[in-house]
Image (spheres, rainbow, N blue to C red):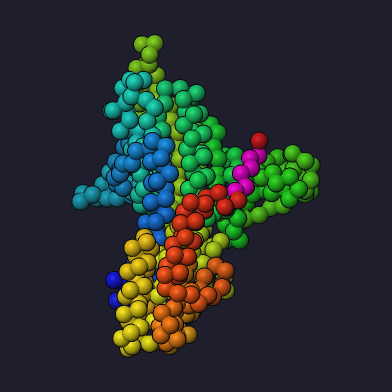
Amino acid sequence: MMKWSEYFLPTLKDAPSDAESISHKLMLRAGLVKKLSSGIYSYLPCGLKVLQKVQNIVREKMNEIGCQEILMPAIHPIELWHESKRWEHFEQTLFRLNDTRGVTPFVLGATHEVVITDIARSEFHSYKDLPKTLYQIQTKFRNEPRPRFGLIRSREFIMMDAYSFHRNEEDLNKTYSTIYNAHKRIFEKCAIDVIIIEADSGPFGDGISHEFMVLSDYGEDKILICNFCSHCADTKKHQIKEGTPLCIKCGKELSVQSAIELDHIFKLGTTYSVPLKAMFLDEDGSYKPLVMGCYGIGISRLLSAILEKHNDKDGICWPFSVAPFDVVITQIDVQDKQTEQRTTDLYNKLVSKGMDVLIDDRDKRPGVKFKDADLVGFPIRIVLGEKAVKENKAEVFNRKTKTVKLMGIEEAVSQISELKKGYQDDGESNNNQRTKSNN
């Protein structure tokens, strides 16, 4: 039985002065993370629960389409980066490690294209081995000169990075489309409305790429949006002439908005397979370089984006899919034996329905408990006061709608269970996606 008095959940009345973004302030105040150094954070129990739920959504959607999870090392031999011809593109980003002799033979992984291609060149020898899509959820390290906004731009972060291997471009296109749609479903399940734009591949690839963006005042990317036809464009690719930029679809004015990049998917082609000599024997008997795709979701950044979009003046409003706890049961009189028994019975009923439940058994004023519950953002708060206990009822507060209902225990359990089940069944389709391209 999970009790708040025993749970490590340190809340703060005010956010630290160096916290800028909404998500950064809420993470610190709600006891999700704790800062160790600039751009480096520890996940506390509540934050880790959310992070794991986000990761499981990603796993679920990737596994559904046949992707296979692996785990690659965080430490990379530096010669592999030189061999891939990618060192000059990432030299300033990579943390370097000295060995006991003072030599720098390794770097910390900021991305894993070179490592996965090294695996592929030793294992994928024939067209019969293809296609394959492998992914991992792992910590990355980037030497950010200016970490900002908590987990939005940090030096240590968690990513899901997937890599697909193919015999030709046609095969890559099929997988690319499948993963594109799976990533849309991931954001839908996380209750995030994303804008998808065709983007610049930068140093990663040599073909088509797409960015999945969420609008935010604290985003460091700029995108152009047409309020008339809803066309979206990347400012780096859009041809902007003098004066106000105009939509290439309808000719109306475009507005520049800030956004957070949550996901970037690429058609890598042979960018890595050629220099690393990752070849396979094709059906016609000739050796060809593997054709690759790359697909990356910022898991820790996605956590920040959820907070940026799901909050109010009182704190976080978690969607059921990623909430650290579905329900908090607030005991008003923690000394009363009858209240304690009612709490235990209710807890067991909810858990039997698949609910994640926390009991607030702290010896604090009701107002303090309510404020903490609102700050942390549990979707449902059940209050067991003196009157409710005597009548075998419960006061049910919905965090999102801010509605309060007094109902019988069985009715409360049934309604909350249906509410969560409804979200699980329909949550994806109930989140309106804006999927636009600058084509």
| Rendered position, 95 above or below 406 | above
User: Where residue 118 sits in the image (x, y, percent)?
Assistant: 32, 33
Q: Position of residue 316 (x, y in %)?
A: 50, 68
Q: Compare residues 295 and 190 and report the one nearer the observer.
A: 190
Quadrant (top left/top right/bottom left/bottom right) for the N terminus: bottom left
Instruction: In the rendered view, tell whether residue 192 sits above or below residue 117.
Output: below
Residue 49 visible to the viewer: no
- Closest to the observer, 348 or 160: 348
Give me the residue at 60% from left, 55% from top. 215
> Residue at left 44%, top 65%?
414
Magenta extent: 433-438
Residue 391, position as x, y percentages in the image: 43, 82
What is the count of numbered marks?
0
> Most prominent secondary structure in the magenta stretch?
loop
Res. 365 visible in picture: yes
Q: Quadrant of the C terminus?
A: top right
For the point 79% across and 42% down, the residue is: 251
| 401 in the magenta segment | no
| 222 vs 15: above or below | above
